[in-house]
Image: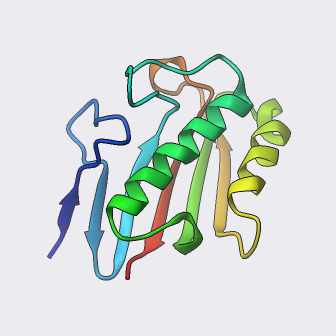
């Protein structure tokens, strides 16, 4: 049985998907883009600032699910330009300072709303 989770401290889903789904002891968080939850607007056009906003959105959703960034087991990072990898990675490392999750990072042709980064996550619950 799956449980749908909605969190007011992160941007609302902008399509027919859930912010997060809890199932079988895990939370599956949909890809987050760097939207400010207060305004619904993209943060500045800087991959470091956008990565931080994305990770803060993920943190809020995970906490609403009874999890945390420390419980993340897998992420997928989507970059509009792989040349942004080093700057994204520097910010990402601050959010996962020890025992980082497994991760895949790929370049994609476009990210919704013209964002430079999107990250999805899977984490343990409980």
Q: Is residue 72 left or right of residue 24?
A: right
Depth check, front residue: 32 or 69: 69
Residue under the image location 53 percent in, 18 percent down: 114
Quadrant into which the C terminus falls: bottom left
Q: Quadrant of residue 67?
A: bottom left
Residue under the image location 63 percent in, 31 percent down: 50
Q: In the displayed image of the protein, which residue is found farthest to the left?
A: 1
Q: Looking at the image, is 68 positioned above or below residue 114?
A: below
Q: Is residue 13 left or right of residue 46?
A: left
Depth check, front residue: 29 or 58: 58
Residue under the image location 20 percent in, 38 percent down: 16
Q: Position of residue 10 (x, y in %)?
A: 38, 40
Q: Position of residue 34 (x, y in %)?
A: 52, 31
Residue under the image location 56 percent in, 21 percent down: 43
Q: How many marks?
A: 0
* Residue 61 visible in image: yes
Quadrant into which the N terminus falls: bottom left
Q: Looking at the image, is 94 positioned above or below residue 85?
A: below
* Residue 79 visible in image: no
Q: Position of residue 122 (x, y in %)?
A: 46, 66
């Amino acid at each position: 049985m799956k449980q749908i989770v909605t969190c007011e401290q992160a941007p609302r889903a902008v399509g027919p998907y859930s912010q997060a789904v809890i199932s079988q002891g895990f939370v599956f968080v949909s890809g987050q883009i760097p939207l400010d939850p207060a305004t619904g607007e993209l943060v500045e056009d800087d991959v470091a600032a956008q990565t931080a906003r994305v990770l803060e959105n993920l943190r809020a959703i995970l906490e609403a699910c009874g999890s945390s960034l420390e419980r993340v087991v897998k992420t997928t990072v989507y970059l509009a330009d792989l040349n942004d990898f080093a700057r994204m990675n520097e910010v990402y490392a601050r959010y996962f300072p020890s025992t980082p999750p497994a991760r895949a990072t790929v370049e994609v042709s476009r990210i919704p709303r013209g964002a430079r980064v999107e990250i999805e996550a899977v984490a343990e619950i409980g």
